[in-house]
Amino acid sequence: MHVLILGGTTEARRLAAALHPVVRVTSSLAGRVAQPVLPPGEVRIGGFGGAGGLAQWMREHEVGALIDATHPFAGTISFNAASAAATAHVPLLALRRPGWVPGRGDDWHPADSLEQAAGMLPALGRRIFLTTGRTGLAAFAALDELWFLVRSVDAPQPPHPLRMRTLLDRGPFALEDERALLRDHGIDVMVTKDSGGSATAAKLTAAREAGLPVVVVRRPAAPEGVPVARDPGEALQWVRECQAGKWPA
Ligand code: NAP
């Protein structure tokens, strides 16, 4: 069976490593990161040209199972995957890590979008640790009174906040380092997407310990009716069931 994994996440790489070489696996990356960490197996990079292009690619490459293991905030590709799977009659699974849940002592402020998160900041603090990635910084560009520490894998492009320092780094991040980061930069508010997972969760613990408010951007809608695996192990089980014919498209 040929399995296509829509990737760009740690979980996608782990799943590819678990499948390869027993199963033929191709991982697809959007091409946003200059030097991506490549998973084992075959890799293709770049968009498909919408849901129709993805369906055609799957037919041409005789894909028998599709796994949408993209980031929970990659909303478009997940809907394209649902549409393409239906068109090409390929079983589809979403591999999506559960969202974070606030614990005792957390001061979380939910927001429905980056724009709403930006609107909440002036009332919460002055020195912001922005961990929402390098895309979407335009939402914060008009906040000239605030200072931002922006952490991202690749350098951000304008428009972005006027008063900003960039930290180029890629998770996982250790708790000790996150504590030091907040302290050394005098951070008084953090902004994060509800990405979930352990690789970047230490910042939430560090914020809780320091008593800092955290603006948490909620996840966008995901396609309904798609079975969801919470971790690569569950996805592996689904592939086995596909091979046994349990999940006809
Ligand atoms: P998006 O808004 O859902 O997708 C925009 C377009 O990018 C899609 O329509 C598709 O182009 C292409 N694309 C996205 N993921 C792809 C994949 N895995 N393989 C091939 N084409 C892909 O996605 P995004 O938010 O720009 O994220 C892009 C990638 O970065 C995703 O793969 C995601 O896993 C990863 N990522 C995103 C975030 C985030 O916060 N959004 C964080 C970490 C990693 P076509 O329509 O031309 O096929």
Image: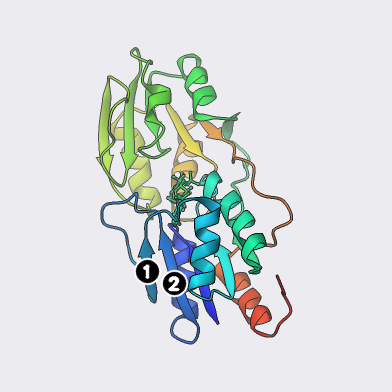
State the residue position of label 2: 26
What is the CA distance from the residue labelled 1 to the residue labelled 2?
Answer: 5 Å
Report x, y in % for residue 195.
52, 47
Q: Nearer the viewer, residue 87 or 156?
A: 87
> In the image, is 149 to the left or to the right of 62?
left
Determine the residue positioned at 51% across, 39% down: 193
Determine the residue positioned at 63% across, 56% down: 82
Report x, y in % for residue 95.
58, 61
First along the sequence among labels 1 and 2: 2
Report x, y in % for residue 18.
49, 78
Determine whether the beta carbon of the residue marked 1 sits less than 8 angstroms from the nearest atom of ligand 1: no
Q: Nearer the viewer, residue 104 or 218?
A: 218
What label does residue 43 carry, if any?
Answer: 1
Depicted 116 relative to depicted 32: above or below: above
Residue contact at pointers 1 and 2, CB within 8 angstroms: yes
Depicted 139 relative to depicted 28: above or below: above
Determine the residue positioned at 54% across, 34% down: 216
Q: Quadrant of residue 228?
A: bottom right
Depicted 189 relative to depicted 34: above or below: above
